[in-house]
Image: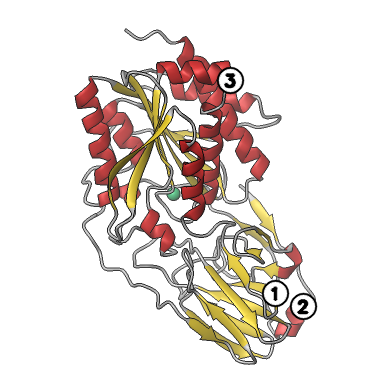
Amino acid sequence: MKTIKFSCLLSLISLGLLFSCKTVSQWEGQGPIQIIETTDQPITFQTKQKFEAGEGVYFSNELEGARLNGVKRINDTLIQVTILPENQPINPSPWYGFKLWSKESNEFWIQFTYGGIGFHRYFPKFSRDGVNFVNVDSTDFFLPETDERRPELGFLKVRSSPDSLWIAAQDRMGTAHVQQWKEDLLQKEFVSKITIGKSKEGRTLEVLKIGEADDKEMLMVISMQHPPELTGFLAMQAFIEELVKDSPQARKFRRKYNLYVMPQMNPDGVANGHWRHNLGGIDLNRDWVNFNQPETKALSDFMDNKVKETGGKFVFAADFHSTWEDIFYTNNEELEGNFPGLIPKVIKKSSKRIPDYVPNIRPNEGNQRSVTSNSYFFFVHQAESMTFEVGDNTPREIIQMKGQYLAEELMKILNKKKWN
Ligand SMILES: [Zn+2]
């Protein structure tokens, strides 16, 4: 059980609030997957606007990736912000993002509220330029004690000025950083771009191809089915960056294998600041049986066609996510795909290189196909597959190490493998 401690603050008194602070127990992992309807559900768009909070303080959600649904002044030193989901039912993990400024320099508290639907999940980050974000000072943020396992409110002290201050749940907002990373990769001669479809809001759905092989043995990597899950994206990034290096290992790998990567499965969700769903109001990671949504449909068609056209096969697949702590969800080890034992071996070998780290591996106990990407990869393509959940607050250097070591150990094993 992972715990996060929040220190008590004298500043509480200034809020006139009687909450005390405590150690908050955190959620331990995902329960059984339920098959749910994945045809379009209505979503509520947030009204993009400037919010007046009184005393010369303003908030805005008029930027890509923002989420802010309401602003209300409670007293001289406290402003309540309301953050609502795109639709319900939904996993209660709210993304938030907005900017604020004031006519004169000012200091006040923001109270995060989630309409009784969500719990405060993300430790706030701030930015003075909208691009470079850092964690707020731990003494400026606290979660009050509640009877629930997780608190529904969060309190953040801010210092405003006429210059904009950005506040967000993770340290990147919007889709631009992903586009930039893809452009950087495309500078390499062995990387190319394949358009596989369009999202509801007209965004291009793209897969990058990495490698110079013949498509007989292929790999698939995806991330950000769930918009706020930046740490999963960062681990995926570190993983891919190892495979595109100019090292003997990586060069050999790219001669032998082609890897396809879709770094941002849900660009509409990210652009609209969604908590979890796409513009069809659906959790994409529940749509890998029915394929009702453009994103899952496009990627599964791409993979199915690839196999048909080339007669090749997918030997490995990974889907990167984020949650409270680092967890590997793997398939039932008694079931055999295209390279039995590959995933446990790669996880164990890469984890051993990190001092004092025992990986949390959760093999699926069932042997039936389910609605997730991991299950589609394994049951439809027999690709050895895993979902890697990365902790929201896992230190960035650890995320980097894990992504890199996974790629290195994977390449070592795959480079040695002789295929018929
Ligand atoms: Zn996720």
Circles 2 and 1: CB atoms closer than 8 Å: yes
Q: Residues within 10 Å of mark 1 (few under 14, many from 20)?
A: some
Residue 198 in view, yes or no: yes
Residue at image mark 1: 157
| Closer to the camera in the image, 410 or 130 | 130
Identify which residue is drawn at 49% across, 63% down: 95
Residue at image mark 2: 11
Question: With respect to residue 266, does 418 lie above or below?
Answer: above
Measured Cα–Cα span from mark 2 to mark 3: 53 Å
| Closer to the camera in the image, 196 or 406 | 196
Identify which residue is drawn at 73% across, 63% down: 138
Label 3 within 8 A of ligand 1 by Cβ: no
Q: Between disc 2 and disc 1, whose residue precedes?
A: 2
Question: With respect to residue 5, does 163 lie above or below?
Answer: below
Going by the numbered disc 1, the residue's amino acid type is: Lys
In the picture, measured across the screen, residue 135 lies left or right of residue 37, that is right
Measured Cα–Cα span from mark 2 to mark 1: 9 Å
Q: Which numbered marker is on residue 247?
A: 3
x, y (%) of residue 185?
A: 49, 37
In which image quadrant can residue 39 be found? Answer: bottom left
Question: With respect to residue 290, does 90 lie above or below?
Answer: below
Circles 1 and 3: CB atoms closer than 8 Å: no
Label 2 within 8 A of ligand 1 by Cβ: no
x, y (%) of residue 202?
A: 29, 58
Going by the numbered disc 3, the residue's amino acid type is: Ser
